[in-house]
Amino acid sequence: MTVLVTGATGFVGSAVARRLLREGMAVRVLARAGSDRRNLDGLNVEICEGDLTDRGSLDRAVAGAQALFHVAADYRLWALHPQEIYRANVDGTRALMLAALDAGVPRIVYTSSVATLGLHADGTAADEDTPVALENMIGPYKRSKYMAEEEVSRLVAERGLPAVIVNPSTPIGPGDIKPTPTGRMIRDAVAGRMPAYVDTGLNIVHVDDVAEGHWLALHRGAVGERYILGGENMSLGAILAEIAALVGRSPPRVKLPHGLIMPVAHVAEAWARLTRGAEPMVVPDAVRMARKRMYFTCAKARAALGYAPRPAQQAIADAVAWFRGRAA
């Protein structure tokens, strides 16, 4: 069985590819020319060079595939040119889904994000049906993922796209080579570069459990349904305390108010735009997101898919060990 995985050079996509290889699948991956392919080292995969913005390459990639995992996304909370994020996440998703329809791919798992879901103001765990609208989305990344998921759902309804949607929460663990925004936080905490933090919360999940959820969605997910692939809700303070205990440091004790961080974020963003430099360490959209605890429940995935994530403590320990190993 030939399975196409997009985003396999990245964090979640490479974990999905490894999970499929363990099942004996013939894994084909879509990879951009010149992309960092360290996450593919040692993996017996067929590499199909292409890009989500190149429809011809997508047609070649899906040809003969019996399943598609669309994991690739432009996951940046800030970009000098935000249209790049929309081009990859919205236009690229639409193009790939249409290519899959034309090729007759019988089964698709689309990787969305909990970023597309609603949140409760009181901090209680949200689920797949918590109300939300596009105007609630903060920043290009969240808006683009919301729009992409809407596009997939529209194609399911109008064209019979055989897609199941999964919404990972905050994956951590080995293989975060870029790293993701959460990975940067863990890396900096491991190195003792986080003397203070803001009051927020995340749903922490091991990246390998997210990959397992993708496998379960392929076989047990209902077309058109979405499933949160999450783990355990933790405050940022508790996450940092756990990391500190693992590395033998004292946890940060200074909790900064959001209002104090926002001016710093605006200055950092303005400097990045002026110098046309890299993504700032803190950006206004990230501060706005942190005002709410991003807590979720994966009860639906547990019941419908048999999804069973490990404790967050194990996920944090694996992530810390991986970042410490890279620093050695």
Image (cartoon, rainbow, N blue to C red):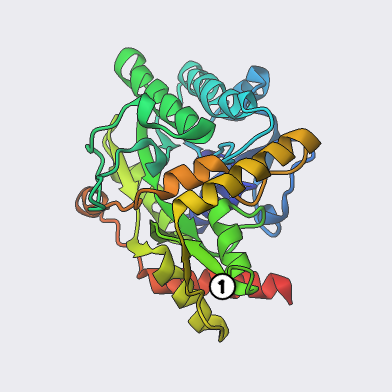
In the picture, measured across the screen, residue 43 lies left or right of residue 227, that is right
In the image, 1 versus 196, the foreground residue is: 196
In the picture, measured across the screen, residue 111 lies left or right of residue 132, that is right
Task: Kindly indicate the quadrant of the structure image that contains residue 271.
Answer: top right
- Which residue ends up furthest to the top in the rendered image? 158
User: Disc 1 designates what residue?
Assistant: 320
Is residue 244 among the parts visible in the rendering? yes
Local crowd size for mark 1, using a 10 Å CA cut-off: few (<14), some (14–19), many (≥20)? many
The image position of residue 167, as x and y in percent, is 38, 43
At mark 1, the secondary structure is helix
Residue name at image x 28 percent, y 44 percent: 220
- Which residue ends up furthest to the bottom in the rendered image? 248
In the image, 179 versus 52, the foreground residue is: 179
The image position of residue 216, as x and y in percent, is 34, 50
The image position of residue 107, as x and y in percent, is 40, 32
- Amino acid at dot 1: Val
Figure label count: 1
The quadrant the C terminus occupies is bottom right
Instruction: Check the image and report above or below for 272 versus 319.
Output: above
Instruction: Check the image and report above or below for 239 versus 69.
Output: below
The image position of residue 257, as x and y in percent, is 45, 57
Instruction: Check the image and report above or below for 191 versus 286.
Output: below
Instruction: Check the image and report above or below for 161 versus 279.
Output: above
